[in-house]
Image (spheres, helix red, strand yellow):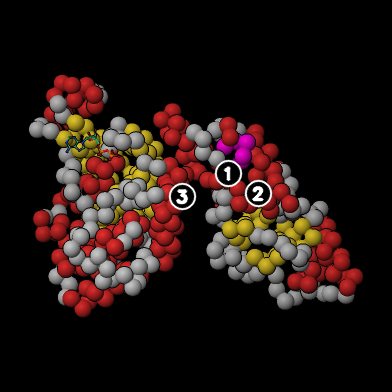
Amino acid sequence: MQKIEIRNLYKIFGKDPEKGLQLLKEGKNKEQIYEETGLAVGVQDASFSVKKGEIFVVMGLSGSGKSTLVRMLNRLIEPTAGEVLVDGEDVLKMSKQELVKYRRSKTSMVFQSFALMPHQTVIDNVAFGLELDGVEKTRRYERSLDALKQVGLEGWENAYPSELSGGMQQRVGLARGLAVDPDILLMDEAFSALDPLIRTEMQGELLKLQDRHERTIVFISHDLDEALRIGDRIAIMEGGRVVQVGTPEEILQNPADDYVRAFFRGVDPTGVISAGDIVRDNQPTVIWHTAETGIRMTLEMLNNRDMEFGYVIDSERRFNGIVSTDSLREALERGARKIDQAFIKGVTKVGETESLQDILPYVASNTWPVPVVNEKNIYLGVVSKNRFLRTLHRAGNGTQQTQEEKSLEEGVSA
Ligand SMILES: Nc1ncnc2c1ncn2[C@@H]1O[C@H](COP(=O)(O)OP(=O)(O)OP(=O)(O)O)[C@@H](O)[C@H]1O
């Protein structure tokens, strides 16, 4: 479901922005327009959408238009042209009153400079937005305490900002953003001022928060590692344009141009592509598991299909275990009858979000393709050694899979 939709959005800074629009339409570029008129093109023709519940990272070099773009989402910067739809409603058509309400209740913004008020306690800093909203004091403090708890600052409510470390101050900034319980959190280089260790910690904190309470987060960053770590999808900006939008894997595997490629140079694909991206569910034999599933029947089935391994799942597709022709025969010799007595011991399944780097040891050490499950233990399929190696090879070359490779892969037996 789309939460935010941006259509043909422009921002031109200067006295006569319409003139700038006209010149862009005539094919002039940003630099020519600046030289001729002194108008600065901040964002040009941006169109994309942000899904409900995702962390959407806007990335680009300094001056590429990130801040301008994100500030147009809550009209801290007034767009020159285009549409910003939030839950289907055009933010640019809102009256002043509607806009105030939208800014206070639907969105909140977290800045790089934590923008804390030094003479106010932590809790008053957090409660500030609610106070503006006219929320009464008891309720205000309740919600602020809850927000402080969410960012791990319980017990610090009466401290002053100067008593806190940089990382803690940023947590207060984040708590202030959370206290109003916004649908949409806009984060402008929110972690950039933090030293690397604290920064990584805060990124982890944000991901954890997102696990518990799904918000739509638009996060500006100029840092690739950060974008890859937290972004469900990334938009890359260059010179005011959005040049590519996609998941980290999509962008890495298929960069739109040299600018994007340059960003990703040196990135190790094994850290970015996940098990879920390369899972295949059509190869090995899947065996539905019930109390009646017998060993003899299973063995016969594997033999008939000339398969060495079978993946056992229940009627809800939850992964139970793996059997092999060997483990089934051994179990029969022991006098066992039910299939779960024939599971290979110590089978490792991997989560769909685990990276290639994480799953490498399992792919390398097992003779059977590694089963991949989601967070509910639902079986999604397997990653075979072949598929794993092919992906590495492709990502390394930055080339697309050819039709030949594709059919080869479909034909590769597990
Ligand atoms: N108020 C303004 N007046 C004139 N030009 C502006 C104004 N604000 C931004 N610009 C110009 O718009 C372009 C985009 O700036 P913006 O701040 O959005 O980039 P950014 O990617 O966020 O950069 P940074 O990472 O340095 O914050 C730049 O060329 C900038 O000079």
* For the residues bearing labels 1 and 2, Cβ distance under 8 angstroms: yes
**Which of the numbered marks, if any, corresponds to residue 360?**
2
The kind of secondary structure element at disc 2 is helix
Disc 1 within 8 angstroms of ligand 1 (CB): no
Q: CA distance from mark 2 to mark 3?
A: 19 Å
Q: Main secondary structure of the magenta part?
A: helix
Label 1: how many residues lie within 10 Å, few (<14), some (14-19) or many (20+)?
some
Mark nearer the N terminus (2 vs 3): 3
Residue picked out by circle 1: 270
Q: Is residue 379 above or below residue 146?
A: above
Q: CA distance from mark 1 to mark 2?
A: 9 Å
Horizontal placement of 154 versus 96: left or right?
right
Amino acid type, mark 2: Leu
Residue picked out by circle 3: 229
Label 3: how many residues lie within 10 Å, few (<14), some (14-19) or many (20+)?
some
Residues 350 and 143: in front is 143
Residue at 48% from the left image edge and 42% from the top image edge: 250
Label 2: how many residues lie within 10 Å, few (<14), some (14-19) or many (20+)?
some
* Residues rendered magenta in the picture: 391-395
